[in-house]
Structure formats: C-alpha cells, structure tokens
Amino acid sequence: MRKSITIFGIVAASMIAATAQAGTLEDVKARGVLSCGVNNGLPGFSQPDEKNNWTGLDVDTCRAVAAAVLGDANKVSFKPLTAKERFTALQSGEVDILSRNTTWTQTRDTSLGLKYAGVNYYDGQGFLAHKALGVKSAKDLDGASVCIQAGTTTELNVADYFRLHGMKYSSVVFDTADQTREGFEAGRCDTLTSDQSQLYAIRSKMADPTSAVVLPEVISKEPLGPVVRQGDDAWFNIVRWTLFMQIEAEELGITSANVDDLKANTTNPGIKRILGTEDNAGERMGLSADWAYNAIKQVGNYGEMFDRNVGPATPLAIARGLNALWSNGGIQYAPPLR
Amino acid sequence: MSERLNTPQVPKTAIWNDPTFRAIAIQVLASIAIIWFFWTIFDNTLTNMSSRGITTGFGFLNNTAGFGILMSLIDYDETYTYGRTFYVGLLNTLLVSFLAIVCATVIGFIIGVARLSKNWLISKMAAVYVESIRNVPLLLQIFFWNFAVIQPLLPSPKQSFALADMFFLNNRGAYLPKPHFDDRIWLVVIAIFAAIVAIVYVTKWARRRQESTGQPFHTFWAGLGILLGLPLATYFLSGVQVTVDYPALQGFNMRGGTEVIPELLSLTLALATYTASFIAEIVRAGIQGVSYGQTEAARALGLRHAYTLRLVVIPQAMRIIIPPLTGQYLNLMKNSSLATAIGYPDLVGVFMGTTLNQTGQAVEIVGMTMAVYLAISLIISAFMNWWNKHMALVER
C-alpha cells in the first residue's frame, strides 16, 4: 500500500511540475544560472574552447540575457544541442533560451509551442562547390549531388530552388556538420549547401580551403534568432528587449568601453533611459534598473558582439551586410526603448 | 471412523485466503495499475502539449514533404507527402537490413567453420577476423568502409569505370541499364512463382523417392532448370516488349538507368562484416556443442567429411545456433539506424530526421519509429521461432 502511495505521489508531482510552466524568470533567478541551448560547434556562433569557455554570436546573445537578468554574463550553462534535439530541449524546459542559429519560419513559430524573440543574424542559404568543377553560378548545378546537414530548413530550400529552375539534383543528407563536410571533401557531392555564414566556417575547416568556392547566389532568407517557450510572455519580453536594447545601444554609440563614462556624464535622454538613470525600463520587465548597463558593460552592444565573433577581423571575415544598422544600409532595427 | 475418512472435512476458508482467487485478484489489480500508469503518462503528455500550443495528431502525414531523398524504392519526389517519406525510409531500412543479414549469415558461417579448421593458418586467420572486427565500434567501421575504402576507391563521375558503355561505377554509385517492360511482364512474374512452387514439390517428391527406393535425384540441377526455364519460356512465348534505358554521363553525373548508391554498399559491408564476427562465434559454439561421437559415428558409416558436416553436424548444431542468431539479426536491423552518419536515407535518417525537423511532431514521429522497429523485431523473432521449432529435435 505504501508503495502505491509513493507511485501515486510521483505521478501527481510530475503532473504538477509539468503544468507549472510560466515563470521562467523566477526559475532562472532562483537557480542563479541561465540555461542556454546552443550549437554543438559552429565557429563564430557557438564554439567551446579547450577549457569549455563558449564563444560566439549565439553564445553572446545568451550572455547578454544572463547579464540583464542575473547581473553576471558568466552565469550561463550552455547545453550543446544537435539540430534534431533543439526544439524538444526547449519545449521540455531543459533550456530557458534556444540560441542556436535557428531559422524563424511560420511553421516553427505557430505549431511548436515556441516564440522567436528576435533576429540576431540575417542569413541566407548558399552553395559551396569544388573549384575543379568550374562552376560559376548555382544555376549551373543541374544534375549535381548536394551534401546537406539533416534537420535544417536548407533541405526544403534546396528542393524549392532546383524545382523552381527546372533542375535535377540528388541530396545526400548527413547527421552533423562535420560529417557533411567529410562527405563533400571525399567527393561524394559536387556541392555543399548551408547558410552562407556556415559555408565560410566549413570551408575554413577543410584540409585545403582553397579547393572550394562559395557561389554568389543566396537562395533563401534565413533570419536566425533566439527562441523561447510560448505562453511565458514576461520571459519572451526580456529576451526580445535585451536584443533590441543591444541594437539600440549600437545606434546610440554606447559600447562596453564608454558605458561607465556615459552613465555618469551623459545628457542624452535616450542613453539615460537605457542605462536606467532616467525612466525605469528594467522594472517594467521585472528586472533591476541597471539591466542594460550590465549587459552592455559585460557583453557589449550588437555591433561589438558581431565584430568580436564573425566580423572582418575574425577568421570568418563576414561583412555586416544585412546585419548593419538600418541607418547604415542594413536591416537591423530596434523599436524605440521608452 | 470410515465415514469420516471417506468424506474429509474441507475447512471453510475466507475467500481472500483462496489461492486461486488471490492469484487472479493480484493479476487484475497489477494490470489495472499498469494500464492506469501508462494512460496517465499518455494523457499527461497530450494535455501538456496542447496547453503549450504544440500541435498534436497525425494530420501532418498528409502535408507535402517538399524535400528530396537520395534513394527510394518506390516513386518519390518533393511533391509527395510526409506519410510517403515514412514508407521510403522504412523500405530503405528493410533493404539494407535484408542484404546485410544475408551477407552476414554467409560470411559468419564460413568464418565460424574456418575457425574449427585443422589448418593452422585458416583457423588463426578466422580468429584474427573475429577478434579484431567485433572489438571495434560499429560506427567507426561504417566510417571506415565509407570514407576510407569505398569513396577513395571509386573515381569521380567523369572518370567512371565503364563496361561496354552500359555499366558505370563511380563515387556517386553504380549505374546499370534499366529495362522497361510492358504489361505482359506479369506473366513472367507469375511463371517465377510457379517455378518456385514446382521446385518445392520436386524436392519433396525426390526425397520421398530416395527414402523409398534409395535412388538419388539431382534436385539442384532440376530446380535450376525449372527456375530458369519456365520464366524464360514464358518470356519468349508472351512476346514482352522491352526497352532499355542506358545510363550516360550528362553534366556532373550519370543520368538514366538504375542507380545503386555507394552508401548502400558501405553500410551493407560494415553491418555484414561486423555481425558476421558474432555469428561466427555462435556457429563455432553450435558445432562444438554437437558431441564428437556423432562425427565419429558418421565416419564409421562411411560418410565423407563434407557430408558429415552437412547431414550430421550442422542440423544438430542449428538447434544451438538459431536462438542466439535471432538476437544478432535483431541487432543488425537496429544497428542499421547508424546509416545517417554516412548519408544513407534509412527510416531514422529520413523520417525521424528530416521529417521530424520540418514538422516538429516529435512525439508522434518517435512513437511511429519505435513501433516500426518493434514490429520488425517481433516479425524476425516470430520467423526465427518458427524455424527453431521446425529444426528442433523431433521425439519419435
């Protein structure tokens, strides 16, 4: 009898635990650590070094949220996830944020119980081809075999692209990015397709990077950004506005280097509002007044994040392009923070 | 006194002390508890998914898939549904499992017998094979066969190995001419089945004749004659029209013909050689499990070595071999899900990979995939049990 009571207790507890889902902010504060789902190894976006220090644009997006919520950008535990695992990990509550170069699509936004909080990188799908083929354009790829990583929107895009142009192809689908690259290097495929940002990273890992070229065509829109669970609007707001705040900070010229000086001396009302010396944006989200100060001081504004991880000074050497501020010809645009 | 002995008093017991009642009651209660437990999990999952706005149900199977699959045994392109991708993946899994099971059994029996050979070199080579192959993780072997053997060995499409401009072999696959028949081909298919039925009857008749008269009959050659002769005769008499589609290099790759992808070869080789090392040990154990007296008796009767093995030792060894062999077949089938590492489109790669990611219906898809593996395992198991019963010692 006692045993059956225990079993009943376990089941009842699991039911209660499963229904208590709102309140990610309270959970994170109580835990003292933000749990963040990232790519298991993608240069520039999320990659651990030998001491398990994670770096990358997606990693910094999580660190900024941790700084805003907990006041410390290092209080993040990173959970490496494959493309297949990522949504389940977020749905089940294993991670608080999914920041894993994940494309924002209508299906994902509406049917998975998830919400995209913003876009931290505007990407597009492209092709990497063996130089020896002499291909100059993706339109010359009729009949090619294409190496693809499983579980990505790229599979659909490539099918659409070849159908649209009346071309034939055969897709060889691998489980991980490294296996895909090995298949391409072994000559199993004529071309490898992925988001353009990844193509440069993949090429830099090849035994002979000069033997492959990135074709000029961009065949899809791939807005990548952080994802949270649906139904927890307070948490959604925090993740969304932390990213907007970083973009706004770049626009206003607040950097990790000058944020202390600006906090003490600025007369610009916009900057004062962000840094919490005038108005209290943080309080409206259940955070402290210095949420933005902490994030900018410890992680930096959006431009710093971009330059540090994928910008021209890094091995990836990606130009700002679409990811420049709207005032500089890009499409990164934050609604006003007031 | 005698009265009392004849009708012993049955002491009245309470119903809960009655062993039959107790046994039934406990089983019913246990069943209810188990059903309730799983129902709670099931209901809990559904409730929580709907409260989180996650779409549930199998409606997604009717949506257009929109992605390509490298290899399909049935008609498939981007315009088919997600439900169709399930069958494509399933058939690919069944194909590679079947090919690998056949090869593994053949290799395993040869190596197993070789290990018992009196020839020192042969038995040691078999031992080295078993010990080295079964102690290396399968995933590594799959990578080895694909990236270290098959891919480097095969040339690029422009330098294909070609035979008579009809057969081509390159690192994209093997290309064979593809015959197209008109509808009368069904007569030939029926003829093949008729031939198989005829062979079964001829075999039975030959055995009966040998048992009653002692006259042997060349069953093998007669069977081969029927199997080839009947369909060929039907083919020529029916006048089936055949057009052949030859593969040819066009652009980057071969077009036309039948394509056999290299991943199928790599995966079959890896699975077959790996499982064969286990089967070899099972075969060896089975043969050694047959008392040596049986061999001596067979020799005393004048049977040659090959006959001794085939007629006396192996049939008895099979009784020991079949049960663990079933386990190896099941393992092989489940191990085939490692296919996705080299890009072979099996059930896990296609359905639990791409389809799962496009739709996000994790619970339904994982559930379906698990049910499929369970069903295939149970079918293999049932067949092997039937065979085991068939081979078991018949008490006379």
Image: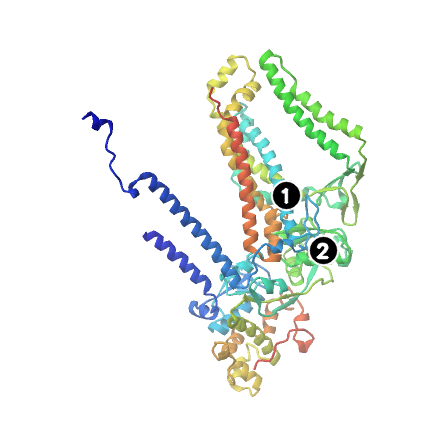
Query: From the viewer's perspective, is residue B16 above or below residue A177?
Result: above
Q: Mark 2 points at which residue?
A: A129
Residue B91 numbered tag: 1
The amino acid type, in three-letter code, at marker 2 is: Ala
In the shown orientation, is residue B12 left or right of residue B94? left
Residues tagged by mark 1 and mark 2 found on one chain of the structure: no
- Under tag 2, what secondary structure? strand
Residue ranking furthest to the bottom: A267
Q: Which of A273 and A183 is in front in this view?
A: A273
Q: Nearer the viewer, residue B276 or B146?
A: B276
Circle nearer the viewer, 1 or 2: 1
Chain for disc number 1: B
The three-letter amino acid code for the residue at tag 1 is Leu
Q: Residue at x 72, y 33 (%)?
A: B189
x%, y% of residue B188? 74, 31
Q: Local crowd at mark 2 within 10 Å, few (<14), some, or many (≥20)? A: many
Q: Which residue lies furthest to the left in this view?
A: B1
Residue A155: quadrant of the picture: bottom right
Work out whether residue B359 or residue B188 is closer to the camera in this orientation and state it.
Answer: B188
Q: Distance between the residues labelled 1 and 2?
A: 32 Å
Q: Which residue lies furthest to the top in this view?
A: B213
State the quadrant of the C terminus of chain A.
Answer: bottom right
Q: Residue furthest front?
A: B3
Residue B210 against residue B264 in the figure, above or below = above
Return the chain for callout 2. Answer: A
The quadrant where residue A244 appears: bottom right
Quarter residue A177 falls in: bottom right
The residue depicted at 41 percent of the width and 48 percent of the height is: B32
Name the residue located 36 percent from the left edge and 44 percent from the top edge.
B25
Total numbered labels placed on residues in the image: 2
